[in-house]
Amino acid sequence: MVRQQAKDGSRGMGARNRIYASFDDAVRDIPDGATLGFGGFAVVGMPINLYGAVARQGAKNLTCVSNSTRGGATLPADAPDMGQMIRNGQVKKVICAFTAPTRASQRLILSEYVDKGLIEAELVPQGTLAERMRAAGAGIPAFYTPAAVGTELAEGRETRVFNGREYLLEEALPLDYAFIRAYQADASGNLRFRRSQRNFNPIMAMAARVTVVEVEQEILPTGAIDPDDVHTAGVFVHRIIKIPPPPEGWWPQPPGSIVR
Amino acid sequence: MVRQQAKDGSRGMGARNRIYASFDDAVRDIPDGATLGFGGFAVVGMPINLYGAVARQGAKNLTCVSNSTRGGATLPADAPDMGQMIRNGQVKKVICAFTAPTRASQRLILSEYVDKGLIEAELVPQGTLAERMRAAGAGIPAFYTPAAVGTELAEGRETRVFNGREYLLEEALPLDYAFIRAYQADASGNLRFRRSQRNFNPIMAMAARVTVVEVEQEILPTGAIDPDDVHTAGVFVHRIIKIPPPPEGWWPQPPGSIVR
Amino acid sequence: MSERAKGLTRQQMCDRLAMQFEDGWIVNLGIGIPTLCSNFDFGDKEIIFHSENGVIGYGPLAAAGTEDLHLVNAGGQHVTLRPGAAIVHHADSFALIRSGRIDVTVLGAYEVAENGDFANWKMAGQQGGGIGGAMDLAACAKHVFVAMEHQTRDGKPRLVERCAIPATARGVVNLVATNLGLFELTSEGLALREIAPGVSVEEVKSATGCNLIIPREVPPVRSVA
Amino acid sequence: MSERAKGLTRQQMCDRLAMQFEDGWIVNLGIGIPTLCSNFDFGDKEIIFHSENGVIGYGPLAAAGTEDLHLVNAGGQHVTLRPGAAIVHHADSFALIRSGRIDVTVLGAYEVAENGDFANWKMAGQQGGGIGGAMDLAACAKHVFVAMEHQTRDGKPRLVERCAIPATARGVVNLVATNLGLFELTSEGLALREIAPGVSVEEVKSATGCNLIIPREVPPVRSVA
């Protein structure tokens, strides 16, 4: 069954109304100024289609959280990613584990905007990034971590010694929306990921008020996934959309098949 | 293959040497003064056989962590549990979410020892107990939680306000050994739990230096569990023992079948 | 002691609270009286029952002889699973709780104070206690409902000005169902919202240990149609 | 610039570090040169390769045409899985890292200082950086090995007294393999342990930006039998 309007996206556990007909429907209510998380690591588990929908939707002043702002080399050059949103002028701030190219030869759209002072880039160690979202999803407002102690990223910040070792205080990073990609979903929103597709996706689903999922396989009837085999429970999932086959839907391509 | 002696239980990732022939072999090296975690919630996932082995092994001055000190009503009265270890004089301290009977009609072995000042009982809210072990397993030395704020358990302790709400500082609870029960294991230590058997067990495995698992089904060859379906990765598991059928091995019984 | 038998049965108390559950709510029921809430017929409403030990979406108690020995609720009772159920471990189960996703927890209590404090983990004079997940639930659920007898076995009130025994959480209780009626904790104090059939307002007042806001008209406790 | 070509190949540098891995070790390889460590023949040793994105127990790179599009390592390369592999999510993957269960991480670096500091996330003059998981790994792994060219393209030393660019972690590096040799960070300073064939001690010293402890005899870098 298709629900066209989410009355209260932050709740809505009902199996009957999680399935959306289009990516555009599922992102319609993003307000300006929202904090959005985009899952995926390299292209795997990256919500390519939802990136496109958010770019079309046009919300502005967004804070965008993801591992990096580009999807890697296995996507065509015109595939949607955070770069597209940045070029659209939608992004106020990014929070990522990569905010600069890792090689001198690389170019990052983000860099131009950061250099001009148009976008703020908060660089966060990858494990801290994951843990800050995990904390948000677990009702933990703050925690201490050993990562980044003694580095530029810890300058001027609060540290504390436990058992003789210095740790850095980190606060939770809650999301208004999480956009993720899964392998399977049942109609009640229970998800499964395949292989390294899992990465940040379950964490972001737990950190978000509204979780929107693009799903690779046909959506299964409620209960088709054994309760022991669910990776992300449906209580953390609000909107699911089946990805159409290409060219309508975006899918990662085998390496070597990409003409950029 | 059977390994009789663990040279370095804290490591030993090798599939070839995780399978132990007996419960007694698997607990032989527990030193006096160790901190032990016992998984399970009610009887489900409770390491009944390992309780028995630790009681026979006889280590003393132990700190024992578990949800409660009794396994519930679906075990025969002579089944091993923490009560047996307490009567043995092995326990110095317990850290539990239940340290007193929940009904006036209930009797708890622990209570007699606490009343006499022989055992220290640290009472911890169940979610905080789980999170303190999760933190230990995640290299997080401390975190803040809303649970227990304003209660007797928070008296004299450090709290802090984040976003206008008061939270209590809690420290990680690392374990020297975790004793847990699983449904399936492969020879490399990958585990699966059935239904509510999961409970504290994956958390304790991650919090512990040495994780010892009693396994219900025949131990599977390495790789027999699909990587997407592993609940606890073998890197967190050091010793596995197949539970023999009754009467040699302890198994929960259907309710109503117990004569106490 | 005669008051104890008076008014609603425990099932009726729980039915009344269960009527408040909204479609799609995630509900956590405490051990004891509150578990009776799951017997309510929710009709078209979809209610997701969550249990501290990581069961999301459990159903009725298992019939004798059909128990799955790997599956219990937080009270150790063998339950069934509804389609769409999912199992998580204890840390994720309390992530669900602490992140405020439990729409309501229904808990038992020894005492509820008019300021919304309540006590349910430690009996007077006891060493230690049985907290379980109650402190996490009480601090974090969107709504905290209490189901309890109106008085102790000795006839002492359980609705009080201030808790005499150690509190489970402060200022969190929204709604209380007792055998005598339904009570709402408001910013002005404790209000009698509905009264049990056959019970007078005076009886409720005399059995209560704090001020009661009594509206001009107090309807009878709504019952199952 | 001629020093750059001199001495060990990148594969030989990584082979030498891989020789140090012990049976049962959990190993995390950084992007770039360190990934070559997985080409080493570990014989009877069981080495578990872990990747930040939650892959525990990956194997060789997938052959062209056989790639699983759902499976990459931390460098985005399509890899295979070994029997016994397990997948976890990002938070659990870094739980493994922060809890000290990674026996060794091999990382690339721009600079390594004689006090064990190293820098690999931010080039000089750059805004922002590419940290990835390096700070978590460097702070928490039991051993931190570095594989890098001995000098920059401009012929500047990468082994230095103090890092000139922002550090990734302080005092954590144990062992460094460069094209010129194998270096150990000791409490007394940086020690040359083995030297690349065809390279003189004087060449190593002149290409190095800090004091070097030179034992009386410096054996050649051990190579694969």
Image (cartoon, coloured by chain):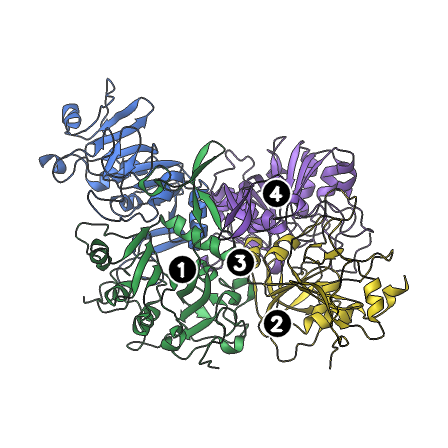
Chain colours: A purple, B green, C blue, D yellow
Q: Chain of mark 1?
A: B
Q: Are marks 2 and 3 on the same chain?
A: yes
Distance between the alpha carbons at the discs numbered 2 and 3: 19 Å
Residue under label 4:
A37
Residue under label 1:
B195
Mark 2 and mark 1 in contact (Cβ < 8 Å)? Answer: no
Few, some or many residues within 10 Å of mark 4 (<14, 14–19, 20+): many
Could you tell me the amino acid type at mark 3? Ser
Could you tell me the amino acid type at mark 1? Arg
Q: Chain of mark 3?
A: D
Could you tell me the amino acid type at mark 2? Ile
Residue under label 2:
D47
**In the figure, B1 relative to D191: above or below?**
below
Few, some or many residues within 10 Å of mark 1 (<14, 14–19, 20+): many
Q: Position of residue D40 (x, y in %)?
A: 71, 74
Q: Chain of mark 4?
A: A
Query: In the depicted view, which residue is nearer to us: B78 or C55?
Result: B78
